[in-house]
Image (cartoon, rainbow, N blue to C red):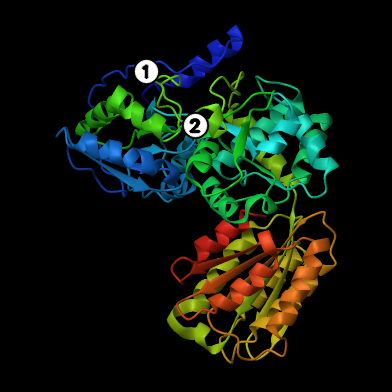
Amino acid sequence: MRPRFLLPLSFILILLLAGCQLTPLQPTPVPTLPPSPTRQATPGGSSKAGALRVAVAPEALAVLQPITNDFNRQGLGTVTLLSMTPADMEAALRAGQPSFDAAVPDSSFWLPRLDRAWAQQTEQESLTGLVRRFMLSPVVIATWEDIAASLGEQPSWGDFLRRVESDPSFRWSHPSAKTGPGFLALLGEAYYAAGKSWGLTAADLDRQATRDALSRLEKSVAQYGESEEATLATLADKGPAYLSAFVATERGVVRFNTTAKSARKLRAVYPREGSAWADYPLTLLDGAWVTPQTRTLYVAYGDYLVAPAAQRAVLAAAYRTVNPQVPLTDPASPIKSVNGADPRQPQVALQIPDEATVDRLLSLWGQVKRHSRQVWVVDTSGSMGDSQKLVRVKQALTVLIDQLNDEDEVALVRFANSSQTLVPLAVASKAQRDALRRAVNGLQAAGQTALLDATLEGYRLLANKPRDKINGLIVLTDGEENASKTRLDTLTATIQQSNRQNPIVVFGIAYGGEAGTRTLQSIAGAAGALGQVRGSDPASIQRLYEDLQKYF
């Protein structure tokens, strides 16, 4: 197994031991490796000589693609970027069918997970080999300027929690901890809860005081989220009514302030305890299909990414650079106070702990997080029998049932000529999950579309429930309303009135080209900032349901 070169670990260690301020990383030369011995190709396919396929976290693609195009013009080989979430990278390796030779996940948090995914299919202990880092962004609390001012100079997570608990209208969010940014947010909370800024251990997480403090923070979350990009897009549309604060990268704050058409500006708050970093490691896979030519091209590509020209493009995109020749003090740098950022911060860089501690933290999050209470409303009208529509929905719901937390509550409502609650709202025990599976398997397409009746029935299941959990209604339809007794204005008035006292998140899924998008928009609009409508088709419905589940 080849040695792994991890630049930031030593960099961060020196910083923390010296107690000094963060400065740009020095570029680290990557040693030229001897050619690998000849091996049999894996099912993932083989790479052409002088070609490198790189799976890239979607948000990094915008900055990397132009840089990569410039690199390819040099004639050293061809680098092809593939937009892929880190979770999809992990799934491809677990299936034993990677279509890439290198990867750029959003965080080093993913590297051991990629190794473990591959180890499930092979006897190879480690797949991720060389690592180059070329851009960084600290994880911060993004909030509106007036709220940031009220929190004071460099507040702690405790200061932030007191503000949340003192204001019932304060809504904050962080991405699901199953995502890289979400895990980094959780990591910052865990260091605060343990009273540490270095060396978090599984033993720290087992202490009751740590668990209680982390639970208190997580229970104050209004909702979770699927991605930073999605949160920023919704925030640009709905403003402070949607969220008072959320965990994001510094880059996200700067990009919002410089591109979004919003009269209000965000400010990055760097918690006193320290910040974790989205470090976008470019890692070469040590797979049998990766040729010596591909490895050589990887080294050249990595060198190009840390050269001044590429680093200026990185800085222009509001990421921090690793090359001191392109410092944050550069006049062209967007990372400045006027854009909501402070290049002097963070003062402390939080260490990603060992794998055992990471696993314990994710397990603990499943216990202490704010759980959900969901009602799934599903169209079973005749048109749902076309193009495998209902078949795909049933497949997607079956996957979601398996992913439910034991503390979640779920109900299932179907509608065609009329609406019917097939599975009443209850905690997701084994019996409840079995009932959901039977009900989903039994869904059949026939009849008309009583969308409004079903939505009202599903909403009433949540209307009087307490606010201890995230209450959410997910409504899917592929057609226009044509069979309800309920009027649209009656339904929207009910949602508007009830949501003032008991906020319920309302997601509408417009399923297919004939979906009743306008009706869904009216329904979701009645929930104000808590309503959204998404479009989907049979090919993407499972991914959409999984994305929406990240809010819970």
**Up/down of 239 relative to 8, above or below:** below
> Can residue 506 be seen from the camera position used here?
yes
The one nearer the camera, 360 or 494, is 494
Q: Quadrant of the N terminus?
A: top left
Position above or below: 439 against 341: below
Q: Which residue is mark 2?
A: 108
Q: Amino acid at mark 1?
A: Pro
* Direction from residue 517 to residue 82 in the image, left or right: left
The structure residue drawn at horizontal position 54% and vertical position 69%, both measured from the top left corner, is 395
Is 84 rendered above or below residue 77? Answer: below
User: Quadrant of residue 266 in the image?
Assistant: top right
Q: Is 206 positioned to the left or the right of 13 in the image? A: right
Above or below residue 528? Residue 159 is: above
Query: Upstream in the sequence, badge 2 or badge 1?
Result: 1
**Residue neighbourhood size for the residue with mark 1, other residues' Cα within 10 Å, grouped as few (<14), some (14–19), many (≥20):** some
- Determine whether, in the image, residue 445 is placed left or right of residue 171: left
Nearer the observer, 397 or 301? 301
Residue 254: horizontal and vertical position, in percent?
A: 51, 36
CA distance for labels 2 and 1: 17 Å
Report x, y in % for residue 197.
68, 20
In terms of image quadrants, where is residue 161?
A: top right
Instruction: Estimate how packed mark 2 is, as few (under 14), some (14 to 19) or many (20 or more) residues with alpha carbons within 10 Å.
Output: many
Camera-near label (2 vs 1) is 1
> Residue under circle 1?
27
Q: Are marks 2 and 1 in contact (CB under 8 Å)?
A: no
